[in-house]
Amino acid sequence: MSPTSLAVIGLGAIGGSVAWQARRAGIKTVVGFSPETADLNAAFEAGALTATAPNPEAAAGGAEFTVIAAPPAATLELLDRLAPLIPAGAVITDVASVKVPVVARALKAGLAGRFAGGHPLAGTHASGWGAARADRFRDCVVYVTPTGQLPGDAAAQAVVRFWSEVMQARPVLMTAEAHDRQLAWTSHLPQAVAYALASTLAARGLEPDAFGPGARGTTRLAASQPDLWVEIFLQNRDAVLAALDAAVGDLAALRDAVARGDEAGLRTLFTTAQRFRESLDA
C-alpha cells in the first residue's frame, strides 16, 4: 500500500526510520508527533516529515495510514485515544514487539477492520531520532498480525503492502499468539541473558578496560532502555518464563559439565552452539 498521507506517532529509531523511508519512497504527506521535542524537530529538519503535530490526535486525524511507534503500554493507550479518529478505509498499525495485548486492545477499541499489528525485526539498543536510518527496513523481516483470520483480512493485507512496497521489507503473516511465543525465544530471551550477564559483570567492580570485544558484544543489548523491556517482559510473561526456564536449565547443565571435568560433554555443547550460530549467517 502506498498511502498519500502517513502519520507516525513516535520518532525514535523505528518510527523515525518509518517516516524517513516513507518520504524517500515518495509518500506525499508525512505528519509526525513525538513527546520528545528534540526528536520531532530533528526529524522535520532532516526532511523525514512534511509537517509536525502537537499531539497524536492531530497527527492521525485524517491520515490514510497511521503507524504507532511507541512502547507497548503507550501503544495500548494510543489505540484507545486514536480509535475514534480512524475513518473507514484508513489503516492503523504499530511496531511493538509484543502483539497479543496490542491486538486485543485494538479489537476492544473497535478497530477490527482497520488495524493489523506489525513488528519489524530491525530494533537496536540505541534510541531516539539519532538512531533512525533512512534504509533501516530494506530487506528486513516484518511480522504482521491480523485481528481476525489470516486469509482475507483487508487491514492486514494493507499493512503487508505498506511494508513491502514502501519500506522494501519482507512481511510475514503470523497470529499474535504465535508471534509472542516465538519472540520470547528469538528476542526476549537474548535480551534477558544480556541483562543478566551485564548485571553479573557489574557486580565484580572491574574497570571498563578489563572488558574486551567478547564481553562488550555479548552485553550490547543491555544498553537498551530498561523501561521498554520491563513492559515487554511483563506483557509476554508466560512465554518469557518458559524461555528463561530452558536457559537456566542449559546453564545449569554447563556448570555441571565444568564441575565434573566432562571434556566430551563440554565439547558437544560448544560444538552444537557453534554450528547453530554459524547457520544464522549461512
Image (tube, grey):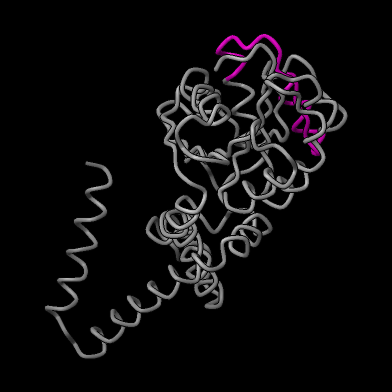
Residue 203 appears left or right of 50: left
Furthest toward the left, the residue is 264
Residue at x-position 54% and y-position 22%: 162
Q: Nearer the viewer, residue 37 or 33?
A: 33
Q: Is residue 29 shown above or below 197? A: above
The part of the image, by quadrant, that contains residue 172 is top left
Residue 12 locus on image (x, y percent): 66, 37
Residue 32 part of the magenta-drawn span: yes
Residue 197 part of the magenta-drawn span: no
Residue 281 locus on image (x, y percent): 26, 43
- Which quarter shows the C terminus? top left
Q: Nearer the viewer, residue 186 or 214?
A: 186
Residue at x-position 47% and y-position 50%: 179
- Which residues are drawn in magenta? 22-45
Residue 64 locus on image (x, y percent): 69, 19
Residue 264 appears left or right of 196: left
